[in-house]
Amino acid sequence: MPRSDLPAWNPRWAFFLDVDGTLVEIAARPDLAEATPRLIELLRRLPARVGGAMALVSGRSIASLDQMLAPLALPLAGLHGLERRDATGCVHHAMADEERLHGAKNELWAFAERHPGLLVEDKGPAVALHFRAAPALEAEVRARLEDIVARLGDAWCLLRGKKVLEIKPTGRNKGSAIEEFMREAPFAGRVPVFIGDDVTDEAGFAAVNRLSGHSIGVGVGDDSQATWHIAEVGAVLDWLASLLDVRVQSASG
């Protein structure tokens, strides 16, 4: 069961932060989610507290994150680790057979046209089907995507999120992205702290736990791998803001 208190501040932390449902409220559509001025200011100031060791780890693309968080240009892992911009600004892309996914995307577009409320999100090397506006269709959506993934083969997997299912290449996730960051400056040698809210963040929680860091779940249940619990987005922002004012530095991790 995740603990409801939060870890004591350590200047040797490295922050890894999910976005939707963690730093910004989940919107009816991904394009409607907005970063508040308060969040932009927090993300501008927080890296200086940890020697620049802060990255966002999201299911969104890097392009989408940059648009949402302008004018900031932060280290990012997008598309659940399929793309990653390191602290030097170099962008790394995982190999993916996008042509192989073309037919699946067309099938999902046609499926969504027949079912009002469904939204297809083309992510390039991945594709997501949102059913937040049509929750009664969840079982049918799941069956359709499971069938598509079975036809695509072992190189592809189905990722479950909050009112969304996504087809993506296997082998990369938020955990692998965090591990890659932790092998590079300025993250290497620090204590990783990952905050996330969704099933898609569980791989990140597991990776941080293996690295003896702190995994913090936002509104997660007892079955989460997160070792700490925080209630909701506003509480996350309040906690991060409080760290900007810490003067007494704890020796604990």
Image (spheres, grey):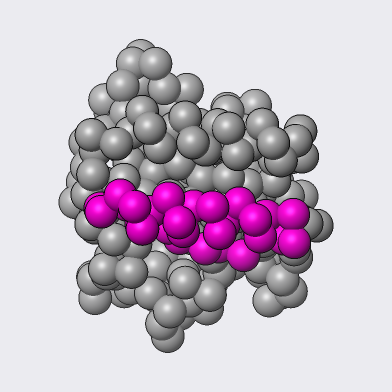
Question: Viewed as shown, does residue 252 lie left or right of 100?
Answer: left
Q: Is residue 36 magenta?
A: no
Residue 224, x across and y down, in percent: 41, 22
Residue 17, x across and y down, in percent: 45, 52
Residue visible at 47% across and 72% down in the picture? 64
Residue 154, x across and y down, in percent: 76, 33
Q: Is residue 105 or residue 32 the one in the foreground?
A: 105
Residue visible at 45% across and 41% down in the picture? 165
Q: Can you say which quadrant of the picture contains the N terminus? A: top left
Residue visible at 65% across and 26% down in the picture? 210
Q: Is residue 25 or residue 72 the one in the foreground?
A: 25
Which stretch appears magenta? Answer: 98-125
Question: Viewed as shown, does residue 59 lie left or right of 232?
Answer: right
Asked if residue 116 is positioned above or below residue 143 in the image, the reply reads below
Q: Is residue 145 or residue 39 the one in the foreground?
A: 145
Residue visible at 34% across and 52% down in the picture? 114
| Camera sees residue 154 | yes
**Magenta highlight: main SS:** helix
| Camera sees residue 52 | no
Q: Is residue 142 or residue 80 the one in the foreground?
A: 142
* Residue farthest along the bottom direction in this orientation: 71
Q: Is residue 105 magenta?
A: yes
